[in-house]
Image (cartoon, rainbow, N blue to C red):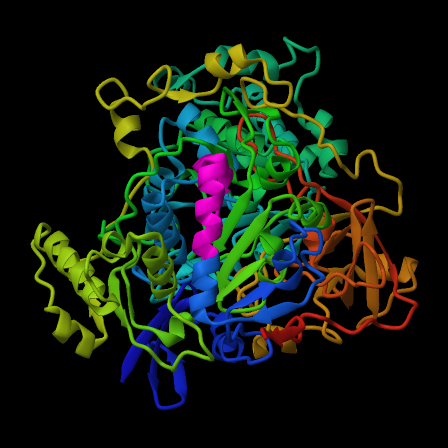
Amino acid sequence: MRYTAAHWGAYTFDDDTLSPVTDDPAPSRIGRGWVSAARDPASRILRPAVRKGWLAGDRGADRGRDEYLEVSWERAAALSAQELSRVSSEHGNSAIFAGSYGWASAGRFHHAQSQLRRFLNLAGGFTWARDTYSHAAAEVLFPHVLGLSNRAVQDGMTSWPLVARHCTLLVAFGGISGRTAQINSAGTTTHEVVPWLKQLQARVVNVSPQQSDYPGAEWWAIRPGTDTALLLALAHSLWSAGLHDDDFLSRCTSGWPQFRSYLTGETDGMPKSAEWAAPLCDIPATRVHQLARDMAAGRTMIALNWGMQRADHGEQPLWAGLALAAMLGQIGQPGTGFSFGYGSTTAVGRPAKLYDWPSLPQGRNPVKDYIPVARITDMLESPGAPYAYNLQKRVYPDIRLVWWAGGNPFHHHQDLFRLERAWRNPETVIVQDHSWTATARRADIVLPATTPLERNDLMLSRRDPSLIYMSQRYAPMGAALDDHDILRRISAELGFEDAFTEGRSPDEWLRWLWDGTMRAAEAQGIELPGFDRFRAMGRFDMPDSAQRRILLEGFTRDPQNQPLATESGRITLYSPAIAAAGLPDCPAHPGWMRPFESLLDAVPEALHLISGQPDTRLHSQNDRGAEAQADKIEGREACYLHPETAAARNITDGMIVRLWNARGATLAGARLTPAIRADCVSLPTGAWFDPDPQVPGLDRAGNPNVLTRDKGCSQLSQGNAAHTTLVFIEPWSGPLPPLGVDRPPVLRQEE
């Protein structure tokens, strides 16, 4: 029996059977489509390919609608090296963009982004991207208000057993879902979130426009985009009833007087009361007042999921949730206080020790230019344009070469038709991937990579107590090579192969990584087996791995001697630094700001688009697999809407519908459910972007990001604001256009 692993679980295999490990209490649905997606000959890139128009000198004009010539690896490596050298010498290395954002493999060595960064750093550097699409607003905000990185907040999250034992009231903004808890970056062996939810004794309130975001909980069907208003109203109810904890606010926070002045309306004449919030949130004021009293009377956890801050002014619900928890005075206690990310991945709240394992050295990047990760279209459209980010004034670089490995921006970015237009601006785009994603189809040089099932690797996840030797299951398809070997060949063309490989083969790199892992374990008093023994075992479980944590426990116990790294050393409810920046879209304290697209201002026919994570794949990974394909309707992604909404538009269950707004349109199959607000429609992300060549602006597959607006959630974080989107929906009346993503682009042999 051998093992392998992915972001969605660990597996064993013998012969043709790939099965979740037997101790996983809730195996991921995503894994059921892994093999069929990875081995699909219609979607795999089988040989290196070069776009015909690029060879003819069109400089990107026909990206996304051109034919390809299949070439040898020698030709592909030479062309890639020549183009990298040309751009570097003519424009400097800051003209090379290698965002390469994406989850790719859970393996420690064959991690495409790490391999590419190592390669490009040796080539003189590149412009990079910082933060994530998942939680950029939190990544920028938390250092200002908690003095902690988002990673430190996630690592320190109060453990699930303490919530199950001590919490009596869990208020989950955005819900807590087993659907999103299928995954963990860098891999996971087991899935514990759903079992922990079943052990909760607490009353649970699911504040979400979808009941399915926490099945079985008390459902508060809030109007989308108004969570901050509800959080402020709950805070106001606590204050007006005298139920806030003055001692905690005095000891552990700064800025309470300024925030209180805003909350009570002293600064703007508008008390943020339950009566003020009720028409905004579509929740009766009496329920808000009662919930506030219940919070103060119980052992309360204020939980926010990652999706809350992927919206216009996305910092505000996080900050308001933290302020509400501070007013309750239960931060730093077992099972209560504030949390961010329960259920957003399976490892948040896992009661296990954290391990810092070695990774592939990437070297030093001599280029200092970067962009916030979600501002790629702005960068490509407007080189030299100014923008604000994290209290800095910055300028977009002039990008001539884009190199992407192990990711698909034509999945996770917003306003994809706008991105497609901007994507034609660079002189060259190089993509290395295993499948013909929308990004690969818009490349000039396409380099076929192996999948994790076609190579050996190590799963060394700091948030998982099991170490997995990922054994190769299949031979590579076609001429696919590992990312390391692809870049080794190109580095040989550029004259630094020895520096890139350090004289090691991939197997020797795995041994090097394991030697470092053994040393790290030894420092903790744990003896790991040698490499050959570990490879034969396939899995090693760390002994005595259980560990329970309480977020901010040490600080709240002794704020004087264990201060936070904020301006004041305490939890920040008002930030002088943010105030001094004078940002028009991010106040210096938690505050309500009307979203740029909102049902509050919309015509009656408009619906709020919910574009959450899918149940059948990780982002766009495995979309061509059997599990995801079986869940579609006539090959289109399914959208979910209320029966009353459907009836008013003559839509029936299973019908193909058109969702549209000013940015674009997409086709989806309708599924009717009462478990969603009637003014909303849910269309999961991840269907492969598939524009109709006959109908400009129409995606054929059901990708919601042709509809979402490409805008930073504020000038503080510049995170994506995908969840602030309005759409219209109607039955599709014309002939159903055939899909294009179910086959490769036109490929010809180079003469």
Q: Position of residue 279 (x, y in %)?
A: 77, 32
What residue is rendered at 67% in x and 17% in y?
271
| Left or right: where 577 falls relative to 598 | left
What residue is rendered at 62% in x and 68% in y?
68
Q: Give residue 674's quadrant in the image.
A: bottom right
Q: Give residue 718's quadrant in the image.
A: top right
Check the picture and name the quadrant holding the C terminus.
Answer: bottom right
Q: Look at the magenta stretch and give its main secondary structure.
A: helix
Relative height, residue 5 to residue 721 (above, below): below
Check the picture and name the quadrant holding the N terminus.
Answer: bottom left
| Left or right: where 593 falls relative to 294 | right
Q: Residue furthest front?
A: 751
Q: Is 82 within the magenta?
A: yes
Can the viewer see residue 738 in this picture? yes
Relative height, residue 23 to residue 312 (above, below): below
Q: Is 294 within the magenta?
A: no
Relative height, residue 274 to residue 435 (above, below): above
Highlighted magenta segment, given as a residue range: 80-103
Q: Position of residue 160 (x, y in %)?
A: 36, 52
Can the viewer see residue 127 in this picture? no
Q: Position of residue 516 (x, y in %)?
A: 15, 55
